[in-house]
Amino acid sequence: MAIAYFDCFSGISGDMIVGALLDLGFSEKELHNEIQKVSLSGFCLEIGQESRGAISGTRFKVVVEPGDQIPRTYREIRQIIDQGNLDEDVKEKSLEIFHRLAWAEANVHREDLADVHFHEVGAIDAIVDIVSSVVGLKALKIDSIFGSRMPLGGGFARCDHGVIPLPAPATLMLLENVPVYDSGQRRELVTPTGAAILSTLAQDMGKFPDMKPKAIGYGVGENPMENPPNLLRVVLGYDDTFRREVLTMYETNVDDMNPQFIDYLLECLHEAGALDVNIIPVQMKKNRPGMLLRVLISPEIKGKVEEVLFRETTTLGVRSFDVNRIGLRREYVDIDTIYGTFKVKVAWSQDDRPRIYPEYDDCKKVAREKKVPMQVIYEEIRKAAQKTLTE
């Protein structure tokens, strides 16, 4: 499992994230190709090597033509990303990051979410930074993202809204429940864009995760100061033994819902991306039988799952809490058999022995088509996979 740890010893910004990913091997050619899929114009990208103090890294900069740095609403930004020819998962994560930005800006300025105006954050460079970050993480095949504590600077800054205190109000909103500390610096260290990207995508923030470091990338920031050097360090590593994830568990008790609707509810939750759904019989108040609904999800789909729970059940409230899941590292491989090619899930034990799990639905489909017992199909796939993986 590939792990990226964002060591924000001198803060974080959108351009620093992209620079660090490029420093780790994210291809400039792929970056240019993906950004061209977004309906934006009036800018160019500058990528080069720069030093801050004794350390060199990659500087990524979006140069916008005069007059093209215009404010945009959240609705307009959604439309720009939606209409792009990006992969669906890149669109989804990019829109989720902008949703968090819109939520923070709307709370700070007391505006409606859809109509909130972005100025610096809504400009071309922020859109490019966010989409490029998501594309870069995908290109590097990062499975899990973690971040350090956030160093906060002080003082004041001037923006399109006027003079604001540092950290910026939107930045503080985005760092809700994130460990922070006073850096002692009188400058902006954490930008809203950087805070939004990491707080949206990171599974946990604070401690260095268990892993074997393999590569280190440095993203160079705009500020030339050297104490501390304006750099973002991203450590790429691997955990070859276990797959560690911080997930979210939702649960709610229901005793007044038509049980005929449960099948549809479970379909909706799985379509929203739920990893696991359980229904447990419980005895509720006034001795009524009911059910405990438990839904395990990745944190990035919280909004989707909450919408399903309140739309498709009779619950008036749900509980949520973080859970740590530890599992064997796993992957999907294509296995050729006499019955065709099958996608097989493989989990690797601590002694590197494969545990092979053919997909049930695929086996069922072929068993019906070929009129062969399912257990025959299943064992044929297992034998072929065992031979392929141990050769």
Image: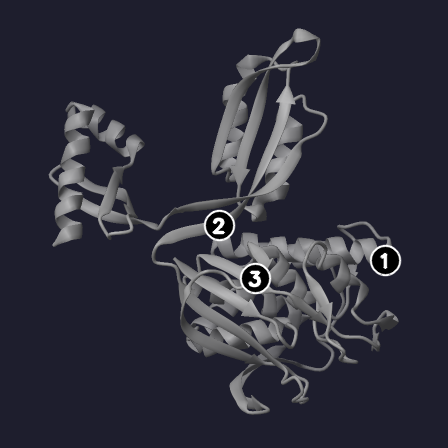
Task: From the viewer's perspective, tell me whether residue 186 is left or right of residue 367.
Answer: right
User: What's the amino acid at mark 1?
Assistant: His
Q: Which mark is residue 207?
A: 3
- Nearest the viewer among 371 and 147 is 147
Q: How many marks?
A: 3
In this rendering, the label closer to the viewer, 3 or 1: 3
Q: Residue at x 56, y 90 (%)?
A: 51
**CA gap, disc 3 and disc 2:** 14 Å
Q: Residue at x 29, y 36 (%)?
A: 359
**CA gap, disc 3 and disc 1:** 33 Å
Which SS class for mark 2?
A: strand
Which SS class for mark 1?
A: helix
Quadrant position of the N terminus in the picture: bottom left
Q: Which mark is residue 109?
A: 1
Q: Is residue 366 above or below residue 349?
A: above
Mark 1 and mark 2 in contact (Cβ < 8 Å)?
A: no
Task: From the viewer's perspective, tell me whether residue 379 is left or right of residue 50.
Answer: left
Q: Residue at x 14, y 24 (%)?
A: 372
Earlier sequence position, callout 3 versus callout 2: 3
- Nearest the viewer among 138 and 321 is 321
Q: Is residue 59 above or below residue 196?
A: below
Residue wearing tag 2? 245
